[in-house]
Amino acid sequence: MAETPKTLTVELGERSYPIVIGEGLLANAAEYLRLAGVPDKSPLLIVTDDNAGPLYLAKLTEALTAGGYRALSAVVPHGEPSKSLDVYNDLITRAIEEGLDRSSAILALGGGVIGDLAGFVAGTYMRGIRFVQVPTTILAHDSSVGGKVAVNHPLAKNMIGVFHQPELVLYDVETLKSLPPREVRAGLAEMVKHGLIWDKAFAEWCRANAGRLLALDSEALAYGLEQGCAIKARIVSRDERENDLRAILNLGHTLGHAIEAVAGYGRFLHGEAISIGMAAAALIGEERGAAGLHAETVSMLEALELPVTLPADIGTEALMDAMQRDKKFREGRMIFIVPLAVGRVEIASDVDADTVRSVIERLKRSGEPS
Ligand SMILES: NC(=O)c1ccc[n+]([C@@H]2O[C@H](COP(=O)([O-])OP(=O)(O)OC[C@H]3O[C@@H](n4cnc5c(N)ncnc54)[C@H](O)[C@@H]3O)[C@@H](O)[C@H]2O)c1
Ligand SMILES: O=C(O)C(=O)C[C@@H](O)[C@H](O)[C@H](O)COP(=O)(O)O
Ligand SMILES: [Zn+2]
C-alpha cells in the first residue's frame, strides 16, 4: 500500500509553497493544484519532453481534465540543448497562440531541464504567471525547489534566467521507476551534495545506502529525497536570492558548469559534471588544510557510481575561461564552495588560479590508466 504523502514547506512568507512527495500523486493533481490556489477558468500549459511525456503526460492531463482544468501540452526534445532561447521562444509563441492569460499556469512535467525551461517561460510570460513543478527525475528534488529558472547561453550555463518560485512541487516518486540507470546516478550527485554541504550524517547515510538508492528501493529513495528537499528548502528559506548562504548549494558547480559548457551541453549530465566538480572542491579543501577530505568525498561519490576524474581532452585553459564567464565569477575572482570537512563548507573568493589549474591537472592525471 502507498505511504501517506509527505509535505514539506519552503517558507518564503506570502510566497511559501508545499513540496508534496509521495506515490501516485499524478492521479490527484487537480486537487493539489486547487489547494495551491491555481484557478481553473484559464488554460494550463504542461511542458514536458519526449521521454517523460509519452510516459506521464496522458495520466496528468486526464487527472487535470477530470478535475475541471483545461490542460494543453507542449513536448520538447529531451536533454540539455532544450534549455535554449530558441526552445524558450517556441514555448512563448505557443502560450500566446493558445491564449494563456495572467490566471494561467505553466506546469513542468519532467526533470531539471524541463523545470528550468518551463519555469523561465512562466517567470517571463506576461511578466510572470503561476508555475507548478511536477518533477520526474531524482535530480529534480534539487531543481524543482528554490525558484532558480533559466536557459543556457552557448558560452555559459544558466546565464539567462530569473528567480520565480512555483506554487507547488508535486513529486510523484512512482515516476522515478522508469529512469535509466545513468540518470539515477546523476541525480544522486545532487542528493549527496546536500549532505556534503550541510549534514555529515546524511552524506554518510547516502554512502551506506548507495546500493539501495541505485536499485531505486522505495524506502531509501523516499528518505533520501525528503532529506535532500528539506535541506534545500531550509537554505532557500533563509536566503532566497543567493545573497550569501544559498551559494553553498553551488558546491561542485564552479568547475562543473565549466565542464558542461566546454564539453558541449549533453556530453556530461549535470550530476556527472557536479560530481567531478565536488571532487575538485575537495582537493582545494585539502590544499587549504582539510586532511583526507578528497579520499573521503571520493569514496562517497564512487559508492554512488559517479565520476571523479576528468578526461584529458577537456582543455584546462578552456575550463579556466568558462569559469570566468560564470555567475560565480565576481570582482575579478572565481568563487568556490570549499569543503572544510564533510558536512561543512565555506564560500571562498581567494582560491588562486594556479591552485585551480593544478587541481584540474590532478583530476586529469588520476583518470589516466596506471
Ligand atoms: N534550478 C535549479 O535549482 C537546478 C538545480 C539542479 C539542476 N538544475 C538543472 O537541471 C538540469 C538537469 O536535470 P535532470 O538531470 O533532471 O535532467 P533532464 O531534465 O534532462 O532529465 C534527465 C533525462 O531523463 C529523462 N526523464 C525524465 N523523467 C523521466 C522518467 N521519469 N523516466 C524516464 N526518463 C525520464 C529526460 O527526458 C532526460 O532525458 C540541468 O540543466 C541543471 O542545470 C537546476
Ligand atoms: O538552487 C541553487 O541555488 C543551486 O545552486 C542548485 C544547483 O544544483 C543548480 O545547479 C543551480 O542551477 C546552480 O546555480 P547557478 O546560479 O549557478 O545557475
Ligand atoms: Zn546543480
Image: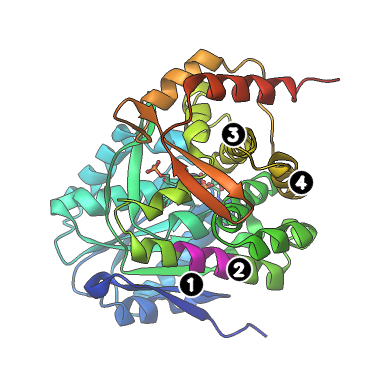
Identity, as a three-letter code, of the amino acid under mark 3? Ile
- Name the residue that disc number 4 marks: 299
- Which of 10/152 is in front? 10
Question: Are circles 1 and 2 on residues that touch, CB within 8 Å?
Answer: yes
Question: Are circles 1 and 3 on residues that touch, CB within 8 Å?
Answer: no
- Which of 312/151 is in front? 312
User: Which residues, given as a range, are shown in magenta?
Assistant: 225-232
- Could you classify mark 4 by the number of other residues whose Cα lies within 10 Å: few (under 14), some (14-19), or many (20 or more)? some
Left or right of 9? Residue 88 is left
Coordinates of residue 3 in the picture (x, y in percent):
62, 83
Q: CA distance from mark 1 to mark 4?
A: 36 Å
- Name the residue that disc number 2 marks: 174
Secondary structure beneath label 3: helix
Q: Kindly report which numbered mark, 1 or 4, lies closer to the viewer in this rendering.
A: 4
- Name the residue that disc number 3 marks: 284
Coordinates of residue 223 in the picture (x, y in percent):
63, 71
In this rendering, does residue 49 appear at all? no
In which quarter of the view is residue 286 placed?
top right
- Name the residue that disc number 1 marks: 26
* Residue at image point 53% right, 32% down: 266
> Quick check: is the Cβ at mark 3 less than 8 Å away from ligand 2?
no
